[in-house]
Image (cartoon, rainbow, N blue to C red):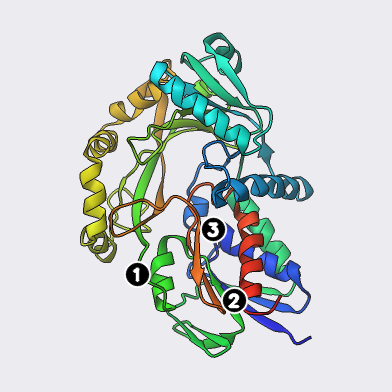
Amino acid sequence: MRTVRAAVVGGGIIGVAVARQLVRTSDDIDVTVFEKEDRLAAHQTGHNSGVVHAGLYYPPGSLKATLCRRGVELLQDFARTRDLRYDECGKVVVARDVDELDRLRTIFERAVANGVPDLKMLDADALRAVEPYARGIAALHSPHTAVVDYVEVTDALAADLRAGRGRILLSQEVVGLAQRGKAVEVSTPECSESFDVVITCAGLQSDRLARRGGDPVDPRIVPFFGEYYLVKPHKRHLVQGLIYPVPDPRYPFLGIHLTKRVDGAVMVGPNAFLSMGRESYARRAFSLRDGSASVSFPGFWRFAGRNMRVALRESRTVLSTSAFIAEARKYVPDLGVDDVVRGPRGVRAQAMDSRGGLIDDFVITGSDRLLHVRNAPSPGATSSMAIAEYVVAEALQRADLA
């Protein structure tokens, strides 16, 4: 059998997992990863709270539900065999009133259908036994929800890739993609190479890269930043694991929650507000190109028009630390403004259609030789190795290279 030349564009956890899966699939596949930054996991992978989601919320039968549960299994095994930090600290989803309790029961039923193990509904007293400082009338407890360091995971996946027939090219931005017969030409500012199959996993730049490869304009990426605060060490005991709100169907984003990290730190957040840059992590950073693309997109204004209440709520948390922490105090009343310091900021690649609808499930498009991961929101990192299995099988089948 002749050697198959494959390329992956994007060095986040999904891109590196896809490249590793290609190498593991056959000894006859050479893989090249193109990453525009000087390091792996530079964007969404390296700017999140590290939660390994159990699969509570996703519609049964959806790609999210299926790949999340498979991804948890693969990630857990990988962390164990590579001696990576993996903390099953558990998660509670807290209901504060009767209306939220009805929605919480729906989440419980959905999670059971998804095969999430050892779930329990807790009353107020049982909630305090799990999270002594949390307050609510009831909670859903997922004891196996965990946290990891996704940068560590990405580096370990990359080590496997390099040990096989894989190479990683850093500081190599892909500026052109063109399918020519049974080959795909990948161009950077320095050179062009031809490959038998190419898979793009470009996260915040996924729509732009897909369009270069001939894909439709929609869905587009509209970036939303999320800010975090860090709880000071003397108050970390207030949070034992993960404390989450019950999602409100009126709002497109989850809302502020409290998360224990694998290093023992405790994060509060994130909020969600339109970012004026896809890769703007500093508070005053912006990109004229990115900001103009968002505010000139009619879909964004249709989305904004339907979500003025949540925009007002989120703007308060952006402008005021007190307003931000007040959202967290709904669940942990003993947390005060003086108990936190400003933490990191992430940017979420939110796929949106021209009607202003948020694309919720994973989206994979493309042709027989060129595939694009157009949307891989949370639980994308959790599902990364399962997404890799799915995408690689699809790509090789389409290209008749299986």
Is label 2 or label 3 in front?
2
Q: Which quadrant would the N terminus be assigned to in this image?
A: bottom right
Q: Are marks 2 and 1 in contact (CB under 8 Å)?
A: no
As measured in the structure, the alpha-carbon distance from the residue carrying label 2 to the one carrying label 3 is 17 Å
- Regarding mark 1 in the picture, which secondary structure is present there? loop
Q: Residue 28 location, x and y as percent?
A: 76, 79
- Regarding mark 3 in the picture, which secondary structure is present there? loop
N-term mark: 2 or 3: 2
As measured in the structure, the alpha-carbon distance from the residue carrying label 3 to the one carrying label 1 is 26 Å
Q: Is residue 34 visible?
A: no
Position of residue 71 relative to residue 171, above or below, is above
Q: Nearer the viewer, residue 165 or 63?
A: 63
Q: Are marks 3 and 1 in contact (CB under 8 Å)?
A: no
Q: Residue furthest bottom?
A: 181
The structure residue drawn at horizontal position 52% and vertical position 20%, both measured from the top left corner, is 139
The structure residue drawn at horizontal position 39% and vertical position 20%, both measured from the top left corner, is 99
Position of residue 177 relative to residue 323, above or below, is below
From the image, tell me which residue sits under label 2. Answer: 7
Position of residue 66 relative to residue 126, above or below, is below
Q: Which quadrant would the C terminus be assigned to in this image?
A: bottom right
Q: Nearer the viewer, residue 304 or 205?
A: 304
As measured in the structure, the alpha-carbon distance from the residue carrying label 2 to the one carrying label 1 is 23 Å
What's the mark number on residue 41? 3
**Kind of residue indicated by mark 1:** Val
From the image, tell me which residue sits under label 1. Answer: 217
What's the mark number on residue 29? none
- Tell me which corner region of the image, top left, top right, bottom left or bottom right, holds residue 155: bottom right
Q: Residue 295 location, x and y as percent?
A: 21, 58
**Kind of residue indicated by mark 3:** Ala
- Regarding mark 2 in the picture, which secondary structure is present there? strand
Query: Left or right: where does residue 137 sit relative to residue 398?
Result: left
N-term mark: 3 or 1: 3
